[in-house]
Each structure stands twice: as structure tokens, then as C-alpha cells.
Image: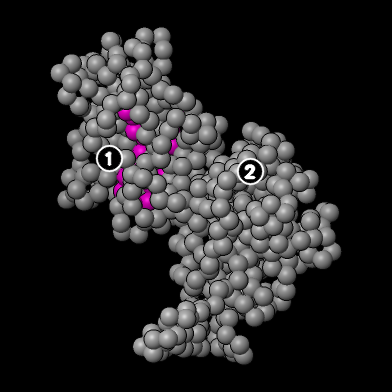
Amino acid sequence: KFLENQVRNVGSIDGEDLSNFVATIVARLSGDPNWVSKAVKGQYMFTDQVFVNSLIFLRKMITDKVLTVYLIPDALHKFSLGKSIFMVKGHEATGSLSSGMGINMLVLPQIPGENVNMAGSATGKDSVGLGLTAAGQADPSVRDAVLHFIQYFYSEAETTQRLQQHNIMAPIIKNYIPPDNLPPLIQQKLNLAFSTTVITDTLTSYLSDDINQLVYYRLVDLVMGGITAEEAATAIKNSLTGSTVTEETSVPTAAPTPVPATAPPADTPTNTPTDTPTFTKTHTATSTATHTFTEKPTPTHTLTVKPTPAPAPTATKEAAVKPRPTLKPIITEQMGLINNPQFTGLKGWEKLTKGRGRMTIIPTKQYLEIRRSGAGKEKGICGVVQTINSPVKFPVILTVSLMITNQSLAGGGEKGTEYPACVQVTYLDKNKAEKTMERVYYNRQKPSKWPIDPEAKLIDRNKWENVKIEINDAREIREIRLFGSGLDFTVRFKDLKMK
């Protein structure tokens, strides 16, 4: 049957789930369910051999082709099509799957070197209870309102509704009796939740959003073979220097919307092994046939699945001209204008974000990936910008290759101003007037009634497009922006040059 479905992967995992998958492994190997939180507090080190061994195990799963990692989320898509035998994902993914697919939900099977005390453990986040401050308790109106809310929120009817909508792993209220007509997958989640007694720390729960993203970058480098496990561990330890431990609370929220099932280009997946599920506040492992992984609660606690932590809001750069710093020396034709055109560690670049949703900026060895998801109906911007402020005495030519892999908003939107791939160069002409040269691209046809920028270009999805911008009247280059705008989108940039 798997051959008939052209199964190419044993298991699938999205890149955004790697951090908590590693947390699952280190708890299993160390025997300490709280290894992650203790490491963040300094009781352990992320360069300790047990953490390095966890990274080695993850990398081995990749090289053994047990897991395939998708930097653009696609594990759910591949799994739902029968293209992978199991996937590592949060329990909320069951809301996008059919019970008729013959799916089983399991905790991570035993792994080599596992501590016997961690057998059957899963990584997850317990639901947090509600409390009342002394000031609130002293005010009868506040106290009554809080009690009224608690009685409503933890009523059997409301709990059952959240359970059926995949918003929680299992009910937190005592003596809860689930209805007899629960869908099979939800019943599986309940059984798994109440049979799992050891819950281990998630990694994402104890780090700030910025630090989480740095850790993600290093894990991407690891799974792509760019660095060793020892180098990744050292980089993760260094990322934590000066970071603040943040105890995240898990509040019942709607399960995150799965990323549209659009297959990435052939160069997207990175083979990684996965017989090991990740259990996290935001993620649950699932698998077909006999392998599925899920988030877990203790028998008396609900593991509330939270949407994947979004990067902390970063200051959005405005188009207004900034005060001019001391200019660099005049650039010659043989010199490049851009600092770090390979985007390594984003040195020299600033994040450019506006709007809500998950903003992800990923510098890999091959390209820079910019992704926005969970935008709903709110338009926004996600990308990078570099301030240059260099005088020039020759025509300036910018070249870059870009690829659009996902665009939820057709064309340029209702006003023809929102495009998933944008390249902008801001400069001063000989009269010191500020100008902007722009190229925009999209890959979804617009409705006939919507306007479109006459310079916008429709390109094929998942294919590289070569861009060239020539500026003949520039006297000073101010900045360059690479970004996407609209609702949900994913765009990649590479081979950036500006001379």
C-alpha cells in the first residue's frame, strides 16, 4: 500500500517542531524530565554531553533517512496523502485528519540509551489554573465576575466543546466523563493523555521568542549538515547568554491553523529520521499505521496546545528618511555595496515586520526564507532591511534570485498593493531627492475586478526568478529591502549582489 502511494519518507517533521523534539530526546537520555528548564536556569549546560548526544541522535535520524524535515511546513500534507508513514506533530493536527485514515497516536517509542525512568514520557505543557489576586478578592464585584467566568470556562459543556474542537488535549476538570460519541481520534487523545504519567519540559516554553528563533536557526544548520552537533550545542549555549527565563502559561486557545498543504520544491526537504515524537505545548506527534506522537497532560492536567511561539514583535522600519550617519567612503565599481549578502546570521540586516501572525525569517546556507503564517484577514509585512548610506559615482545594478512557494492572497490584493515578493532600493538622486526603485512579484492570478501594479510580474510557484534593477541617477544608496506583504506567504531570496 505504501508503494502504491509512492511513499518517499519514513517520517516527516516540520522545522518549527525541531526544538521540542530535541527536548523530548534529551529528557529520555538524561532521565530528568526537567532537564531543559534546569539548563536554562544554569543547573545544566547545553554543552553537556547528554545534550550533544541528543543532537547527534537527531542528526542520525536524518542521515539514516528515518525523518524528513520540512523547513516550509509540509509534514501534515505529506502525511495526509500517505507519503510518509508517520509524522511528528502537535495533537491539534488531528483536526485536519480523517479517522478513516487508520491513524494511531503514540508517544515516542524507546530510543537507544534511554533512561528507564523516562519510558513512555512525552514533552508537553500542563494547563495553568486560574487565580484571584488579593485586590480582586477584596472587591465583591471583581470576585463574583471571576468566579462566574471560572464556572463557565470549566463547565462540562464548555470543556467538551473545546475538546471536540481540538483546542485541548484532555479535560482538566476532575471526574469529567466524556460523551460516548467522541470521534475516534479525540478518544485516542484522551486515552493517551490519561495513560501518560511522565511529562517532560518543552524547550520553547522557557525561552524568549528571540532566543527561540536563534535556537531554531542552529537546529536548521544542524539538520542541513552545515554544523556538527558539538557546534550546534555551543551556539545554542551562546544564544542563551543574557537571556531571561520566561515561564509561558498555556491558555486554552484555538488550535493553530495548519499551513496550506502546498508541496515545497524538490530542494526543500531535508531527510531526518523520526521514530521519536515531540510532545510540546504547541506540538504533538502523530503517525500513521503504528506511529503517532502526541502532546501530553498528566492525568489531572490538560496539555493545552498553544500556537507555535511567534517571534517577538520587532520594530517596523518606516519609509521616512533617517538622520544621516557618517557616510562610508565612496564605493568603487569593484566593491559590493551590501554587507553580508549571504544573510549569514542576519549580520548587518534588520528585521522588517508589521502586523500579527507568525513572522519567520530563516537564513540558511542556500537562501534566505521569509514566511508569514496565521495572519487571518490582517495584512502585514515580513522581511529584512539593510541601511547602506553610501555615495556612489556610477550606475548601480542589483541582482537577486527569488522564489515564491506560498501566497494566500491572490494578485496584489484588493488594492493591488500587497505582493509576496518585493525588492526595494531607496536612494538619493543628484538633487538629493529620495527615490525608491521597486520590483514586485506574485504567483496567484487576481480576480478580474482587482487592480494590479503594471510593473508586477506573475511568476511560477517554486521556481527561481532572476531579478535585475539598474539605477542610473543615484548619488547615494540609502537602503535595500527584501520582503513580502499581504496575508500568508513564503518567499526565498539568494545570490544577492549590488555593485
In terms of depth relative to the viewer, which is nearer, 200 or 109?
A: 200
Residue 486 within the magenta-colored segment of the rendering: yes
Give the image's coloring scheme.
one colour
First in residue order: circle 2 vs circle 1: 2
Is label 1 in a helix, a strand or a loop?
loop
- Please give left or right for residue 247 compared with residue 145 in the image: right
Per the rendered image, the range of residues in magenta is 479-494
Residue 178 within the magenta-colored segment of the rendering: no
Residue drawn 34% across and 33% down?
481
Residue drawn 15% across and 18% down?
431
Quadrant of residue 140 in the image? bottom left
Which amino acid type is marked by label 2?
Ile
Circle count: 2
Which amino acid type is marked by label 1?
Glu
In terms of depth relative to the viewer, which is nearer, 145 or 279?
A: 145
Q: Are marks 2 and 1 in contact (CB under 8 Å)?
A: no
Give coordinates of residue 411: x percent, y percent.
27, 45
Residue drawn 53% across and 67% down?
249
Q: Is residue 143 above or below residue 304?
A: below
Structural crowding at the residue carrying mark 2, measured as other residues with C-alpha within 10 Å and reported as few (<14), some (14–19) or many (≥20) = many
Residue 107 seen in the current view: no
Quadrant of residue 23 in the image? bottom right
Give coordinates of residue 488: x percent, y percent.
37, 51
Give coordinates of residue 391: x percent, y percent.
29, 16
Residue where numbered disc 1 is placed:
318
In terms of depth relative to the viewer, which is nearer, 91 or 310?
A: 310
Residue where numbered disc 2 is placed:
236
Residue drawn 69% across and 36% down?
231
